[in-house]
Amino acid sequence: MLSSTVQTPDEAERPPGKNQWLPVLMLAFGVFVVGTGEFVLAGLLPLLSSSLDISPSVAGQVITIFALTCALAGPFLTTATGRWERRTVLVSAALVYLAGSVWTALAPSYGQVLIGQVIAALGVGLFVPTATVTAAAMVSPAHRGKAIALVVSGFTAATALGAPLGTAFGGMFGWRSTMWLATGLAAVGVIGIFFLIPTRTPVATTTGLRQQLRLLLEPQIVAVLGVTLLAFTAVYMPYTYMGIIFETATQGNSFYLAGLMTTLGVVGTAGNLGAGMLADRIGGPRVVTIALLWLIISMLGLPLATGNMAGALAMIAVYGVAAFAITTPQQHRLISLKPEAAGVLISLNQAILYLAIALSGSIGGLGIAWLGAGNLGFVAAILATVALLLSTSMKSGNRGAMNASL
């Protein structure tokens, strides 16, 4: 939610030294920690359901509440702390996340787990945008993109490595042990941020919420954000309930489930990079169209691949390419509509992503209750189809401007 960094000419010309990249790497580690705490919940749902004696669809609402809290509270907290020192904000956010993890690990009931995850989500909603902007502020403008990419890579690592390891750890020692592991990593992050992040990191003042919300009155922006919402609700639905959908294939084994999550993370990373390069050649809207068609086809075939591990791995690989190929083209589309508000638009897009994760948990839970876990792919396919129709309906009017921006 913060705009671009304010630097003096001397700072702008200064090449980044090793001491500048160490704090950036620490921020990336922080994003990895909070991202792992978020994404590992999907792998822990079967254990959570059994331990607390609740249905899988009810257990999935933990993810819904977490993501919804991030989406709604993040912008307000970022604005409220806009004039604080960046290190103070980062340490405070990490401590709030740590407190939420401890609360969750000690929670005796499902209701207490939800409270713990709301607290943790408040920390995540504040930490991630602050870490991104702070990383950009600590290097020269010529290296700002690299700094942001390093911090964002923390989420990729959380998907490909952190969540699978956390799932496997929970399978061996129980889901509470994973929460304690997240707490320990968060404590390391707090110490590292306190000692490595400069006391004063110059950033621009925060854009007010009223100014941000005005952008939501522009139809084209709303349409692009609508595509993001529908597409990623479809994308995250099978991820949120992966342990339930592939329970037969994994035989309830957390290590097998961790293997599926690792496959998704690795293939998804490759898909994201490929989508970025393809967008430079054919334009973002076309890449989104291809990815959504790919997603629809894979979701329609999902019920055929839940009976054995080989089929599950193949389906996860196919689905993973499309799942991660939508992010970058959608961001390009937003920036092309209003380049001068790029930072705010990307922040809004991030909030929409969290909202999509929340909806994936609630809609997916209803889908499981009404249709069964094996048919959840059909629900995701319907949402992806609506996203495709919305995306293609606005493509022709915006093709010139969007392609020019790419």
Image (cartoon, rainbow, N blue to C red):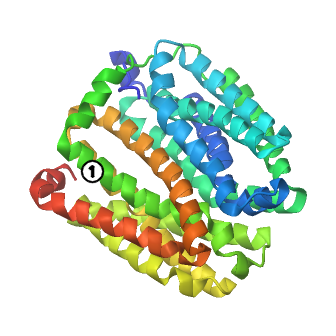
* Residue 289 relative to residue 153: left or right: left
- Which quarter of the picture shows residue 391? bottom left
Name the residue rendered at 65%, 23% in the picture: 91
Q: Is residue 293 left or right of residue 268?
A: left
Q: Is residue 29 left or right of residue 274?
A: right
Judged from the image, the secondary structure of the residue bearing numbered disc 1 is helix
Label 1 Cα neighbours within 10 Å, binned few <14 / some 14-19 / many ≥20 = many
**Residue 349 in picture, x, y percent from top left:** 37, 43
Residue name at image x 61 percent, y 53 percent: 157
Relative to 317, is 286 on the left or the right? left
Q: Nearer the viewer, residue 121 or 278?
A: 121
Look at the image and tell me whether residue 22 can be seen: no
Q: Which residue is mark 1?
A: 224
> From the viewer's perspective, is residue 100 above or below residue 395?
above
| Above or below: residue 362 compared with residue 197 | below
Residue 314 versus residue 5: which sits nearer the camera?
Answer: 314
Residue 322 lies, in percent from the top left, at: 42, 69
Q: Position of residue 290 (x, y in %)?
A: 30, 72
